[in-house]
């Protein structure tokens, strides 16, 4: 606390004001800056007021003449309407999502064909070992991403680059744990215990779902395998309403229903005959039905995995696209490391029981399996980013587009064109994807607009508080 000097005898408590010279200096000093405090200045003829109470003359770094007003964050934000900013933000997310969608579609198709060829034609039918190798390859997602980011910022010193990257990953994990964008100041608890628990139960769900895929791949056709496995779109929608607290949307429900109808048409519209494969032994009706049943259970678990990942391992809404992409691949590496370090345990058990003899591939089988593993890694990284930027429902329906691509690949490989039912089912899936994309785009724009309006109103409140403090 400070106080004014005691007035001398005969001195008025408040004089008539500063001299003309002092007043001129005071006006020049505060002009264009902030309003002068109404606190009365104590003049002195014999006692000098403290220096911090005297009008300050302009220094050599200040322009005594009025300058153009600087633009604050609030003024620059208001140069564009909230709707325009929201559309730009949503457009950037959609561009990134579209790129990773294309990568995921291509990589998943190649992986499906290679896995089926290795198991059917080359006879290396090791479902769990293949699952272990493919999911374990996800551990390389973060190192590859780090190398790419380092290449883009190769002019930045390594210690500075590394500290920035670690800070970004750590703060993003804390945002996920607290489910809020603005972190409080001070030292926060380490997010590693939360990440380890989340990695454990998300990876377990993924492993069981993925295991059904590798078991069924030798029991049914590639088109049926892809079609039924991607029924996870419906279960992703159901789990999203339950776990993500999404509001029921008629447009989304209709889109998902149309997509599931397309899946059923592709899988069973040909009367259960399937696509004959010249170089493979076509599964009989009972085997194909059992394989489809196994993969159907896997689609339920895969829909649950997608929603669990979105709920517990993705940044909250409003996070930038770049931060979301970086953390998606980082979490993918955690899944890969958990697979390599923990999920090797069933391998010797299956070998001892005689259910799956452990045997490393050689020759052509090894090379094709390696390529299949690489394609799965690309698909996993792209799909995790796609879920983080959009939603589990849209990502699942987008994955249904692989049905059409796989059918074309089978046509090219076997020379037998898709049936009329397969073509009609694929058209239904494409229509459903277009409907869901439009619905999701409108939701993203609306969410971004509301969020920016809240930011602007918060700035106005801050400005009002500043004016009150100044007055």
Image (cartoon, grey):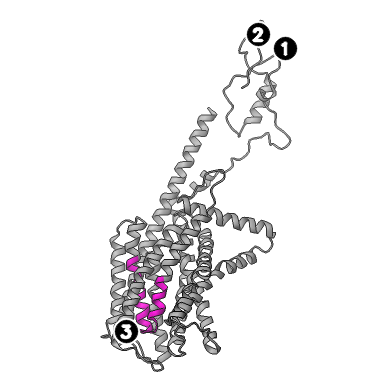
Q: Which mark is residue 11?
A: 2
Q: Position of residue 440 (x, y in %)?
A: 38, 62
Q: Which residue is mark 3?
A: 288
Cα–Cα span, label 2 and label 3: 105 Å
Label 3 secondary element: helix
Pointers 2 and 1 in contact (C-beta within 8 Å) = yes
Q: Residues within 10 Å of mark 2 (few under 14, many from 20)?
A: few
Q: Residue furthest top?
A: 10
Vertical side of 141 occupied by 404: above or below? below
Q: Is 224 on the left or on the right of 370, as rendered?
A: left
Give the secondary structure at mark 2. loop
Residue 133 against residue 35 in the figure, above or below: below
Query: Magenta segment, principal secondary structure?
Result: helix
Residue 452 rendering spot, x and y as whole percentages: 45, 49
Q: Quadrant of the N terminus?
A: top right
User: Seen from this angle, which residue lies furthest left?
Assistant: 271
Inter-mark Cα distance, 2 to 1:
10 Å
Tell whether position 217 is magenta.
Answer: yes
> Dots 3 and 1: beta carbons under 8 Å?
no
The residues colored magenta run 208-235
> Residue 259, image x and y in percent?
31, 72
Q: Quadrant of residue 237?
A: bottom left
Residue for point 50% across, 68% down: 342
Residue 46: mark: 1
């Amino acid at each position: 606390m400070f106080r004014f000097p005691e007035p001398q005898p005969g001195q008025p408590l408040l004089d008539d004001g500063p001299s003309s010279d002092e007043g001129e200096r005071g006006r020049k000093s505060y002009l264009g800056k902030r309003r002068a405090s109404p606190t009365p200045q104590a003049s002195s003829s014999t006692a000098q007021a403290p220096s911090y109470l005297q009008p300050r003359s302009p220094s050599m770094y200040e322009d005594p003449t009025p300058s153009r007003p600087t633009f604050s964050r609030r003024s620059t934000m208001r140069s564009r309407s909230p709707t325009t900013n929201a559309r730009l933000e949503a457009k950037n997310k959609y561009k990134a999502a579209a790129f990773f969608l294309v990568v995921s579609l291509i990589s998943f198709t190649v992986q499906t064909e290679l896995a089926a060829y290795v198991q059917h034609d080359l006879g290396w039918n090791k479902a769990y070992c293949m699952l272990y190798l493919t999911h374990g390859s996800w551990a390389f997602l973060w190192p590859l991403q780090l190398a790419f980011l380092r290449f883009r910022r190769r002019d930045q010193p390594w210690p500075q680059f590394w500290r920035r990257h670690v800070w970004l990953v750590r703060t993003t994990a804390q945002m996920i744990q607290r489910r809020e964008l603005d972190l409080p100041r001070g030292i926060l608890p380490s997010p590693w215990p939360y990440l380890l628990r989340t990695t454990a139960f998300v990876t377990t769900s993924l492993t069981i779902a993925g295991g059904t895929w590798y078991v069924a791949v030798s029991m049914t056709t590639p088109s049926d395998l892809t079609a039924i496995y991607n029924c996870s779109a419906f279960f992703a929608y159901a789990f999203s309403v339950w776990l993500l607290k999404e509001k029921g949307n008629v447009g989304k429900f209709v889109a998902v229903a149309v997509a599931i109808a397309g899946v059923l048409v592709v899988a069973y519209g040909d009367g259960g005959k399937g696509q004959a494969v010249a170089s493979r032994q076509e599964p009989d009706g009972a085997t194909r039905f059992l394989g489809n049943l196994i993969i159907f259970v896997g689609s339920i678990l895969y829909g649950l995995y997608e929603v669990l990942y979105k709920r517990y391992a993705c940044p909250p809404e409003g996070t930038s696209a770049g931060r979301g992409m970086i953390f998606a691949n980082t979490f993918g590496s955690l899944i890969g490391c958990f697979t390599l370090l923990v999920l090797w345990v069933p391998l010797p058990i299956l070998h001892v029981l005689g259910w799956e003899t452990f045997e490393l591939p050689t020759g052509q089988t090894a090379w094709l399996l390696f390529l299949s593993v690489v394609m799965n890694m690309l698909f996993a990284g792209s799909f995790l980013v796609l879920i983080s930027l959009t939603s589990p429902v849209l990502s699942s329906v987008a994955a249904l587009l692989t049905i059409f691509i796989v059918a074309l690949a089978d046509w090219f490989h076997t020379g037998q064109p898709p049936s009329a039912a397969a073509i009609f089912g694929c058209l239904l899936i494409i229509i459903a994807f277009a409907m869901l994309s439009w619905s999701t785009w409108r939701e993203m724009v609306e969410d971004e607009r509301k969020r920016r309006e809240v930011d602007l109103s918060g700035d106005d409140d801050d400005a009002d508080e500043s004016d009150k403090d100044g007055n």
